[in-house]
Amino acid sequence: MIVAGFTTAEDGIAREMALLQQEQPAALLWSSGTPSLVLPAALRRIPRVQDVAVQAERAGIPVVTRRSGGGIVPQGPGTLNLAMVLPAPPGFQLEDGYRLICNSLAEALTRFDIRSTTGACEHAFCDGTWNVLVEGRKLAGTAQRWRSAGSGPIVLAHAAILVTRPDPAHWAMMEQLHRAAFPGNAELRLEAHVALTDILGARTNPESFPGALARAAEDRLSRLITREFKAA
């Protein structure tokens, strides 16, 4: 497990892409020190999104692009990211990648007596079928990127976990970007989300969670690789 702190989200995203290029099993747990908003590069090319992005950057909120799809995601000290890279075993499907990342997070949460589910969450940012939910509210979003290699597909599964909910200024700008990118879609609502600081309780230090998540991710990645080796 690689645990890293980056100055910007761009640095963290670049490290994930570098691990994908290496084509070896790896797990990366990271956060960035500079608050920013991250959105797919395809969305940034929309003129009305460009206009809002310029407003955000003038307000001191960097807007960063990523290669994967989806919606706008907050990054910074309040977001913890888990990336898992592995050569896809025979028969490994997109759903298996989502189960790997979501179940790693679910296992870590159970160590704090917190139960989670997966599913869509109306009014959540970057909504999708493979959100990780606690009591019906979105705690984490997930995404994947696959790369073809000579030995077969290489999978990068990623989760962005809210440690704290976005501050009002970032939330307001994220809402503007969402409306510009997805006119006609459901509006974003802060109450559709939950953060680790909300669910861990006053007696639990949120800083203890990354260690539990690292162990869960390493265990699941190791078991998957071991099964593939035995099958070979």
Image (cartoon, rainbow, N blue to C red):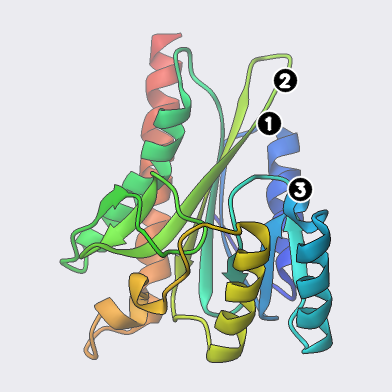
From the image, tell me which residue sits under label 3: 42
Q: Nearer the viewer, residue 209 or 10?
A: 10
Badge 3 marks a residue whose secondary structure is: helix
Image coords of residue 199 (percent x, y): 26, 77
Amino acid at circle 1: Glu
Q: Nearer the viewer, residue 52 or 221?
A: 52
From the image, tell me which residue sits under label 1: 23
Q: Is residue 160 visible?
A: yes
In the image, residue 6 above or below residue 84: below
Image coords of residue 41 (percent x, y): 77, 51
> From the viewer's perspective, is 230 left or right of 60?
left
Which of the two labelled residues, at mark 1 and mark 3, occupies the earlier sequence position? 1
From the image, tell me which residue sits under label 2: 149
Residue at (53, 88) in percent of width and height: 167
Badge 1 marks a residue whose secondary structure is: loop
Residue at (63, 21) in percent of width and height: 153
Residue at (69, 38) in percent of width and height: 20
> From the viewer's perspective, is 179 left or right of 45?
left
